[in-house]
Image: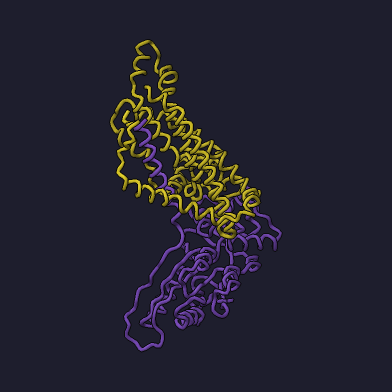
Amino acid sequence: MSISRKTITALLAAGALAAGVAGCAGSSNTPAATSPASSSSSISGEITVFAAASLKATFTKLASDFEAKNPGTKVTLNFAGSSGLVTQITQGAPADVFASADTKNMAKLSDAKLIDGTATNFATNVLEIAVPPSNPASIASFADLAKSGVKVVVCAPQVPCGSATETIEKATGTTLAPVSEESSVTDVLGKVTSQEADAGLVYVTDVKTAGEKVKGIPFPESDKAVNTYPIATLGASKNKELAQAFIAAVTSADGKKVLDDAGFGTP
Amino acid sequence: MNRRSGTGYTGVPSWVYVIAAAGSLFILLPLVAMVAKVNWPQFIPLITSESSLTALGLSLRTSAASTALCVVLGVPLALVLARQPFPGQRLLRAFVLLPLVLPPVVGGIALLYTFGRQGLLGKSLEVAGIQIAFSTTAVVLAQTFVALPFLVVSLEGALRTAGSKYDAVAATLGARPTTVLRRVTLPLVLPGLASGAVLSFARSLGEFGATLTFAGSLQGVTRTLPLEIYLQRETDADAAVALSLLLVAVAVAVVGLSYGRRRSSAPVKEQL
């Protein structure tokens, strides 16, 4: 008896450990490199930027460009799903700037009077069909996704990419029968890159990021659901001047170019 | 056997109790914090919504199926590991225990490359007309993968404790190996098998990472309760908390049930 009880205790501990690891995916802190403080710029100090996961590549570049141009500044980035970031901010996480993947999540913060002034729309994103490079189901249009036997994976309606999918379905009168409704774009893309699915609906920018592993098929109906990305300074910011300067850099011509290159549109 | 009774001496220094109390608080406090967050007036509507009930039903069905699969595969495995030593036995045991310490998402990726459409076995299965990806079968496979070690280890422990004396006696009396297994060995370790099965069921119920990676998420087909909680969290924190509490309640009920059963069967074992 005593042996089996010990074993079970050990097992429970090990099981708890294994189960705990699963919950760790999500946000990540990426402290950008500090640049040497030498120039005589009027702005200085540190800010923390909370940005939607889909902005990871572009904002990492924008932040390091910003630091290079403004010595003595440091931009710390935190990427996660927009709704998760809103929860963190309302729970008091120290952030100076918030860039959301949709206006709905930004509205949650402005309704709670947590942003300083008004939000600025700085980018747009539309859906695109992602298929494995060989395109096994010969998908050529949005209507092809509804053909029987096509394994299509979409985002669940609860997340922004899923509500965009739903909007397009309604606008075109096409009803999809997805084999899976994932919680994030990353999970949809994963099912396509592993070739489990014949097609997935993700953002244009995700297809660009995935590179060779998937093929993107743009479709005209995607303009029925354009996702707008707003950015704002948060009311709790201790360095609003620097926060504003960073937002100005994102919305500047140089910032637009970085976003354009990644596939984002102009609002 | 090693219990001192009557004198009141427990052999545990008092400071140990202080640390033990801190340890139990560490587990209990987050649960209390979650209970405090529950939107009680909305609790019943939240957990009885159609999507919640579908997810709960799917979770219970798939966990029962994977527990059955764990018993079918795990009992022979535990017997092989507990009885006659053979070359590579320690290695085999280490590999059987691997899912315990593996992050479930890694298990999901491994299963994907085994049973997925492009996987090791998946291609042959697809030719045979069997598609596992995005099906309830995929959920059961993911759960069995993470839960099997729980059954094997607790049954192996029970088998070692019971020893093989009675098996040997039965054999000398003329019973064939299968009869010994059925009439002597398994009845002796039944409590160990039961608690192993309960732990497997509880682990299956909580399975998340491997399912998300390998099976996908579709209401009524692959979206189990943990996946439903993860999805609800995106839009409705109240629903996520309510469902989490439901999952905790089911897990507590399952584990509590097994402890009750083990208690009542303990005297029988201690006589052996």
Q: In the figure, is residue B41 to the left or right of A186?
A: right
State the residue at coordinates (52%, 72%).
A99
Work out which quarter of the rendered image holds the C terminus of chain A and state it: bottom right
Residue nearest the viewer, comparing A141 with A154: A154
State the residue at coordinates (64%, 51%).
A177
Q: Position of residue B255 (x, y in %)?
A: 48, 39
Residue nearest the viewer, comparing A217 with A259: A259
* Chain that is coloured purple in the picture: A
* Chain that is coloured yellow in the picture: B
Q: Is residue A222 above or below residue B197?
A: below
Work out which quarter of the rendered image holds the N terminus of chain A and state it: top left
In which quarter of the view is residue A174 placed?
Answer: bottom right
State the residue at coordinates (56%, 43%).
B59
Q: Is residue A42 above or below residue A114?
A: below
State the residue at coordinates (63%, 66%).
A222
Work out whether residue A95 can be spotted: yes
In which quarter of the view is residue A62 placed?
Answer: bottom left
Q: Position of residue B249 (x, y in %)?
A: 54, 44
